[in-house]
Amino acid sequence: MEHASLFQDVVRYIGEYLEQDVSHLRPESRVATAIPGLDSIKLFEMTLYLEDRLGVEFDETVMEHIETMQDLVDYVATRTSGVAETT
Amino acid sequence: MSCRVVITGLGLLTPLGASPGAFWEQLLNGVSGIGPLTRFPSERFACRRAAQIDDDALPAATGPYAHELKRMDRFVRYAVAAAGGALEQSGIAGHDGGGVFMGVGMGGLPNMEAGVVRQDSRGPRKITPYLIPSLIPNMAASMTALTYGLHGPQYTVAGACASGLQAIGVAVAHIRAGMLSWAVAGGTEGVVTPIAFSGFEALRVLSTATNGPPSPRPFDAGAEGMIVGEGAAAFVLEKREHALARGATILGELTGFATTTGGEQIALQSVAGIVSSMAGALRDARMDPHDIDCLYSHASGVPRGDACELEAVRTVFGGNGHAPTLTSIKGHVGHTFGASGPLNLAAAIAALQHQTVSPVLNLRTPRTECDGFDVASEARPRALRNVLINAVGFGGINSSLIVSRAS
C-alpha cells in the first residue's frame, strides 16, 4: 500500500479526534460512510484536527472531492511531500 | 379554571456541588462556594474571586450527542447536567410531550472570547465549526431537549438576571393553558471569563474586598459589590393531576408568577418595578402579603440594588404585621445571573420542606433599610407556607415567583 505509514497516522488521528476505535478503516473505506456519525460539522472540525496533527493545510474544498481513505492519505502526502509530522 | 402546576424534579449544578441535599446543608451551615479565581490569570483584575464550578464536577458527556456536548460552552453543559438530575428525580422520562424552557442571561461569553483570541492568533480559518452552535443562547434548551429526547416545545428566555425565573414562569403559563402536561424549566449561566470581569468591573459592581469581612455581603451596611458565580438549576414542572396520576412525589407547587418592566437607567433597579412584580405574583396566586412567610431575594451585595429591593419589600409588606423573613443565597454562591432565580427556587423548596429559612452569609450589620424586617442572619426555623422569589435584570426586567408547600 502506498504511504502505509502515513495511512496508519491518519487513522490514528481520526480515532483520536472522534475518541473511538476506527481501526476498521481500510484504504478503500469511504470517508463519508465508513466513519460512524461523521456529519458535516464533525468532518469540518476533523479536518482542522488533521491539519494540526499532520502539520499541513488542506485546501478549503478538498474534502468535497475526497471519497476514500486512500484519497485522503494521497492528498495529505501531496501536502507533506510524503513526510507526515507526528508531533 | 387553569390547572395547578407542581414541581416533581429538581436538578442542580452549583459551586456547592450537584446534590440538592448537600446544597441545602451548605446553605444552612454557611459554607461558601466562593474562592480564588483560578479559571484564568486574575492579576489584572481588581476582583480576583469567583464561585466557580470545577471541571471535575461536570458529569461526563453521554448520550447520542456526547461529542457535541463536549464542545458546548459551560452554560450549556451546566443546564444539561441540571436537567438530567431533575428528570431522574421526577421519574418522568419516557412520558411524551415534555417541553423545555431555559433561561440564560449571557450565553457563551467564554467560547466567544476564546474564539476571538484564536482568530487573532491563528486566523479565521482555524475557528472550529462548533463555535457558533456552542455559544448561542438557545443551545442550553436545545441540548437538553436533544440529549433527553424531549420532543415538545423548546423556548429560550434571555431576560438578563431574571432569565431563569422568567423561563419557569413561561413554562407555568404553558402548563396552565393546557398546552403541555409537563416541562423541564430552569436557568443556567457560566461566564467566568476575562471579558465578563472587564465588563462588570467597568460597571463598578464587583466586590474588590481583599481584607476585612468576607464578601459579598447581601443586605449588609458594608456591602461593596457582588461576586460572579456560575451554575444551573432545572425543575420538572407538571400538571398536578398528571403528577398525581403517575404517583410522583410533589416537591412544591408554583402558585404565582409575574414579570414586569420598570427600571431606572438600563442597569439600575426600580422600586416601582419590583413592587409591581411582587404584587402581580400575589394577585396571580390570589394571596395577600401576609400569606408570604419568606422572601428569597435578589440581593447580591451591590448596595444600590439591595436598598432598592428592600424599599420595594417595605412597600408591599410593610405595616401588615406579618412581614416575611428575608434571605439571600448570593453570599454562598455569588450572583449566578440567569440561574439566580432558579437557584433561589431550589433553596426555597428545601426551606419549605425543612420549615427553615437559610441564613444570609456574611451579614454582620444589616443596612438601615432592613429595620423592622426579620433578616435571617442565621438559620431561622419558621412555619413556612409560601415563599416569594425575586429576580431582577438589566433592561428593567422584574420577576417574582411564589412557591408553596406541597399539599
Image: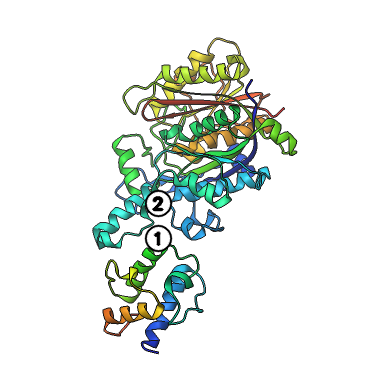
Q: Is the C-beta separation of discs 1 and 2 under 8 Å?
A: yes
Instruction: In this rendered view, identify the residue nearer to me: B36 or B232.
Output: B232
Residue depicted at x 37% and y 83% = A6
Q: Nearer the viewer, mark 1 or mark 2?
A: 1
Q: Amino acid at mark 2?
A: Pro
| Residue tagged 2 | B133
Q: Position of residue B101 (x, y in %)?
A: 52, 38
Q: Position of residue B38 (x, y in %)?
A: 41, 53
Viewed as shown, does residue B195 lie left or right of A35?
Answer: left
Q: Position of residue B51 (x, y in %)?
A: 46, 45
Q: Amino acid at mark 1?
A: Ile
Quarter in which the N terminus of chain B is drawn: top right
Quarter of the view holding residue B338: top left
Viewed as shown, does residue B230 lie left or right of B265?
Answer: right
Q: Position of residue B123 (x, y in %)?
A: 24, 61
Q: Are marks 1 and 2 on the same chain?
A: no
| Residue tagged 1 | A41
Residue depicted at x 51% and y 18% = B280
Q: Is residue B163 above or below residue B45?
A: above
Quarter in which the C terminus of chain B is drawn: top right
Viewed as shown, does residue B273 lie left or right of B203?
Answer: right
User: Dot 2: what SS?
Assistant: helix
Q: Is residue B139 above or below residue B251?
A: below
User: Dot 1: what SS?
Assistant: helix
Quote the CA–CA distance across marks 1 and 2: 10 Å
Q: Is residue B113 above or below residue B202?
A: below
Instruction: In this rendered view, identify the residue nearer to me: B379 or A80.
Output: A80
Tally the numbered discs.
Answer: 2
